[in-house]
Amino acid sequence: MEIQIGHYLALAALLFGIGVAGFFLRRNILIQLMSIELMLNAANLVFISFNRWMPENHLGQTYSFFVIAIAAAEAAVGLAIVISFFRLNKHVDSEKASLLKN
Amino acid sequence: MSMFGTVFFIAGACFSVAFAMGTVSSSNPLRAALCLLGYIVSLAGIYLSLSAELMAAIQLLVYAGAVVVLFIFTIMLLGPSAKEEIAEYNSDSAGQAYGSKAIIFAFVAMITLTLAGGVVGYRRYLPAVCPSGNPDCGFGGVEAVGASLFQKAAVPFELVSITLLVAIVGAIAVAKGRTLEEKQAFSNKKSLEEEKKKQANEKAKLLSEEVAAYEGH
């Protein structure tokens, strides 16, 4: 079996779906943040696999470089919010985070 | 791609999907973070199979070296309340022991896989892709990606540095916020001060009235 771009895209779609499921099904904010990282990595995989089959330039890898930088910033800010949320509520349950509800 | 490439892709895909499922489904956030680490390393292996060496290295440096460590710091800082439900958690310790052993074995296997891809010479089995007629264009290497980055995306590159700076400042500002008790203590202190001021004012008023009465007298 020859591995083509479709295989990589299917893998990326699967990983993205797992990330979406984790984000919507779990109630732990930490695990929801990790699910976001899963999704960002799946998007990176799409960029890099498209770049592999269009090797005239490196735009896909350049984009994925930026995605990684933004993901790092997002993790820093997200975890700071988690810590601040925990100091107020003494738990990390996003179901009970209802300060801005209604 | 050769037979080796096919096997490599299938193994990497299996590992990454298994670790992603582990990240999403484990009740202990620490185990989820370790599964995230495994997912990231297996994705780095897949990047190697796509001849994206620099991106694989950056993936390992930034994610495995920084983001996962940040997650683990936070989980350790939050302590046992980072878990979702403690009752469900203590139920089966035997299953947990097997689970942790399985994770360790999966880790060893996956690192072996990545090394097999990266060190044993994947260039021979997964030849670099190049536009026709140029056998050694260095696709995915530091030089090529760096040239693309600084020729076509120099301004966004600089903007990313500003974004990171703002994120650092924002993270500090958000994480330094006061707790509820500190807030209450602060407001209590404020009201105490106001009361003191009021009392002082009343005293001064009384005193001035007395002085006025005395002078009038």
Image: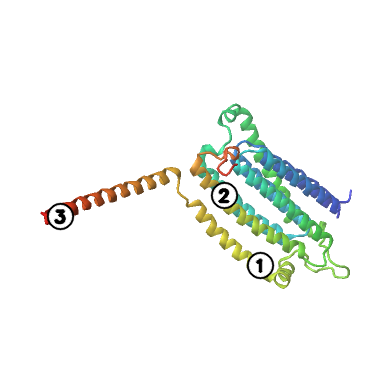
- Going by the numbered disc 3, the residue's amino acid type is Val
Tag 1–tag 2 contact (CB < 8 Å): no
Q: How crowded is the residue under tag 2: few (<14 C-alpha within 10 Å), some, or many (20+)? A: many
Instruction: Inspect the image, locate mark 1, and give the three-letter code of the amino acid beneath it.
Output: Phe
**Residue type, mark 2 in image:** Leu
**Residue B98, image x, y percentages:** 64, 32
- Residue, disc 1: B157
- The spot of residue A1 in percent (x, y) is 89, 48
Labels 1 and 3: the sequence-earlier one: 1
* Residue displayed at 59% across by 65% down: B162
> Label 3, label 2: how many angstroms apart (C-alpha)?
62 Å
Q: Position of residue A73 (x, y in %)?
A: 61, 57
Outermost residue, left side: B217
Q: Chain of mark 1?
A: B
Q: Which residue is label 2 attached to?
A: A79
From the viewer's side, name the closer residue of B177 and B186. B186
Q: Is residue B159 above or below residue B69?
A: below
Residue under label 3: B211
